[in-house]
Image: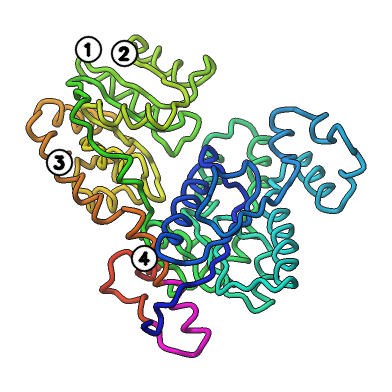
Amino acid sequence: MQPGSEPLRIAFVAYRGNMECGGQGIYLWHLARELAALGHRVEVFVGPPYPDPMPWASQVHRVPNREMWAKWFTRDYAGMLGEKSRTEVLSPLNFYELAASRLGFLPEPFAFSCRAFAAMTREIRGGTRWDLVHDVQCLGYGLLGLQALGLPVVTTVHHPLTVDRRASFVRDATLRDAVGTAQFYPIGMQRFVARRLERVLTSSETSARQIVDDFGVRAERVVNVWNGLDTDYFRPDENVTRSETELVCVGRASDPNKGIKTLVQALARLPDPVRLTLVDNDHPDNDIFKWARAEGVEARLHVAGRVPRDELRRLYQRASVVVVPSRFEGFGLPAAEAMSCGAPVVACQAGALPEVMRVGGGGLLVPRDDPKALADGIRTLLDDPARRTQLGRSARTRIEQNFSWPRVAQATVSVYRDVLAERRGRPTSTITSDKVGARPATPSKA
């Protein structure tokens, strides 16, 4: 066996593991699977909601919590105390989660990191050994305990929570809302921990610069390995006929960063036959319906609600154009998924979208927050079916080459090996300017 090619023993920690919870669950499941396929030993410590089965992992440790914050958010106050043994709530971490949730803080990352530290310490005492720990967006203080035990720890941050906090401030309507936003996000803890870990992996050059600027992590410790995409699943289907008039967008109207209001205003500038399908909450109180009524396009809007994965793929395969009107994206997964399905994309020049669109080459970029420019970009593609077809075909190939999970897993292993080589006092090789998908961040000039 060549030196540096031996299988690694990797422990993942993730405070939420289910793919329905968002990007962290998807990232955990797919990356861990691909690392196991490469021959590495993968063990997972994960909090609820728990992931789908991981038969290729050597072991999946479920790290329980009482999901206090979720129950507080849904006003399930009785559930916060529990039904069986209410004295359990008086244990230190449970009581912390109860009190922090009641005061408006997000307690999960800190509490999970402490529980994961305790669980992993028990395993180490029993003789288990790992070469490296990979955290997925928790950045809780417990990770520093693992590092103090001599374990190299890296983390993945798709974008820092400062981005979400700024978006929340935009949405806040009252001083009370703003105070709630200020106290909710555990940014101080995450900033403190991120600065002290061996590497911070991220999914775009934009996010890498944001982590350097907002968290103060040294640029040479932040590495862009891109995000992964299941290109075997998200693929074109010749049996699905593409519409000539259907736009598709995946995004929450409640998140100002998604730019959905701008898209509705753009829809009003497009011909009447053009329809928009939005994958978002279809509750009547969703602001999307108010905006559509104000623009006179309510009859041309279909809000699909939360759709199953198969239906999302079918929407991409059927769409004439997929629109990503975001004001910021740390990666822009819907744009990549759409291009992987052969759909042309119109996206805004915001966040990492120019990077993803440059790699995929499957559409047009327009200025953000500009309904007219967005409408003009969409109209350009709607009026040129041949161009749409050509863009979709070429993008499929390029997305597969750059964003497939096997490629991301190989780049991630290169980062692991660099960290381990540094620990042994050897020169590293991954962090160079000539390796796409594994480059250090450069601070922004802003």
Q: Earlier in the sequence, mark 4 or mark 3?
A: 3
Disc 4 residue type (three-letter) = Gln
Query: Of helix, strand and loop, which mostly describes the magenta segment?
Result: helix
Instruction: Determine if residue 292 is in view.
Output: yes
What is the secondary structure assignment of the residue under circle 3?
helix
Disc 2 residue type (three-letter) = Arg
Instruction: Determine if residue 446 is in view.
Output: no
Residue sitting nearer the eye, 393 or 108: 393
| Magenta-drawn segment | 415-428
- State the mark number for residue 300: 2
Residues at discs 3 and 2 in contact (Cβ within 8 Å) = no
422 inside magenta stretch: yes
Residue sitting nearer the eye, 160 or 281: 281
- State the mark number for residue 283: none
- State the mark number for residue 410: 4
Disc 1 residue type (three-letter) = Asp
Q: Position of residue 135 (x, y in %)?
A: 57, 61
Compared across the picture, whether 129 is left or right of 325 comes to right
- Which residue is disc 3 drawn over? 393
Disc 3 residue type (three-letter) = Arg
**Residue visible at 36% across and 65% down?**
410
Report the Cα–Cα distance between label 4 and label 1: 47 Å
Report the Cα–Cα distance between label 4 and label 3: 26 Å
- State the mark number for residue 272: 1
Q: Residue furthest bottom?
A: 425
Compared across the picture, whether 335 is left or right of 362 comes to right
Q: Position of residue 165 (x, y in %)?
A: 56, 46
Q: Earlier in the sequence, mark 2 or mark 1?
A: 1
What is the secondary structure assignment of the residue under circle 2?
helix
- In the picture, residue 377 is in which quadrant? top left
Total marks placed: 4
